[in-house]
Structures are given as C-alpha cells and as structure tokens.
Amino acid sequence: MNIEIKKSTKPVNYKKAINLLEERVQNLTINNEKELIWFLEHRSIFTAGTSYKEKEIVEKSIKILKTNRGGKITWHGPGQIICYLVIDLNKRKKDIRKFISAIEKSIINTLKELNINSFNDRKNIGIWTNHNNEIKKIAAIGIRVKKWVAFHGFSLNYSNSLDEYKKIIPCGISDKGIININKIKKVSKSEILRKLEKNLLNYLDY
C-alpha cells in the first residue's frame, strides 16, 4: 500500500482541511498520488452532512457549516481525534460497505486494545460503547465517494467537552448519549494514535 501518514499537531481550519482533501482526491485520480491517512484536530465547529434536517438543531443560534459528506449534524473540536482518509477503492474491492467496515474494525480494535469494549450498529452508523448500562456513541463516521475514491473519515472522542452536543441532535439520534475515552479511562492521545494507525494500515490492506 502506498499511503502517506500525516499528523497535524496544531488545530487545522475545517474548510482548509476539506479543500486539501478534495485536492488530494483529484491528484490521486489524475496523477496517481499517494493515498492518505491524516490525523488532526479542529477548533470548535458544527458541520452538517447531506442528510441533516433543520429540526436536529436544538440551539438555533449556533452556526452550522454545510458539507458534502454523508451523514447528519455533528460537532468537532479540541480533544477529539479527526482521521481524514483518501483511499482508492479502485485498488481494492469497489465496495463502500466493506470500506466502512474496515474503518469500524480499526476503531473497535483500537478501543479493545485500550480495554474498552465497543461495537458498530447497522441502523445507527458510528461506534458505540456500553458505559454504566447506557449505550453511548464514542466515534462518528462520515464518508463521501467520488470515482471510487473514498474520502472524509471519522472522529473519535478522547477528551473533548460533551456539552456542545446538547446544542444539536448529534447524527440525528436523540435517544442515546455521547461519551469520550477519558470518561471511561485515562489514556494518552499518542497511545491512541499509535494504535489507530496500526489498525487502519492493517484493515485497509484488503
């Protein structure tokens, strides 16, 4: 696999990040540029995917940035690991479900290595964990595919504020909560990133 691993230490502007992704998709298609796994954080921002509904905005005063990724409304901000991907499905099976499954397994296995049990849910996309007998979301996934190149990616909560989610109905799901890794156990960001990178390279090799 010819994948570049990129890690940004300072917060990256959301629009700038998406422009870079779009550029990478185009270059990969035309010039056979490397695929990409990019770990970063954003400053606080609410983004809406292509299937969001106005009623999912609880606090009407917040600003929402509309995007071309799949999914509904979510929040990104400090303490949340964003992983953007640019992966060529022409070089793998042209199967979007299989690609999403590879992402899900990468996150689930990473959490398992941190002794946190989690699972996917076909009805409610993302990764979930049972904490104190409550099912809560710990990672969100949003993908777009152009000419069989998959991009955008996922966010994994590790130490972020959970209050921002009260301003929206995150991912359109109102009956389940949100959690981060540090509410379950204290883990360093570097350890999470190390395990995530290993698992992504493993599961994307298909």
Image (cartoon, rainbow, N blue to C red):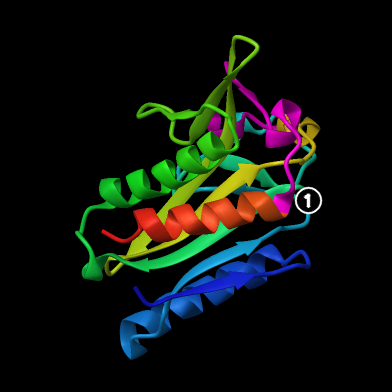
Q: Residue at x 74, y 47 (%)?
A: 188
User: Which secondary structure, mark 1?
Assistant: loop
Q: Residue at x 40, y 27 (%)?
A: 121
Q: Is residue 109 left or right of residue 7?
A: left
Which residue lies most toward the top here? 133
Camera-nearest residue between 82 and 184 = 184
Span of residues in magenta: 168-189
Q: Which of the image's four quarters has the N terminus?
A: bottom left
Q: Residue at x 37, y 26 (%)?
A: 123
Could you tell me residue 98's position as x and y percent? 27, 48
Q: Which of the image's four quarters has the C terminus?
A: bottom left
Which quarter of the figure has residue 33?
bottom left
Residue 88 visible in rendering: yes
Which residue lies most toward the bottom here? 31
**On screen, 55 above or below 139?**
above
Could you tell me residue 38's position as x and y percent? 56, 66
Q: Residue at x 67, y 63 (%)?
A: 14
**On screen, 205 above or below 57?**
below
- On whether residue 65 falls in the magenta region, the answer is no
Estimate how packed mark 1 is, as few (under 14), some (14 to 19) or many (20 or more) residues with alpha carbons within 10 Å: some
Camera-nearest residue between 120 and 111 = 111
Residue ID for mark 1: 78
Identify residue type, mark 1: Pro
- On whether residue 175 falls in the magenta region, the answer is yes
Could you tell me residue 105's position as x and y percent? 40, 42
**On screen, 153 above or below 169?**
below
Camera-nearest residue between 13 and 105 = 105
**On screen, 206 above or below 188?**
below
Q: Is residue 145 left or right of residue 55?
A: left
Q: How many marks?
A: 1
Residue 69 visible in rendering: no
Which quarter of the figure has residue 94?
bottom left
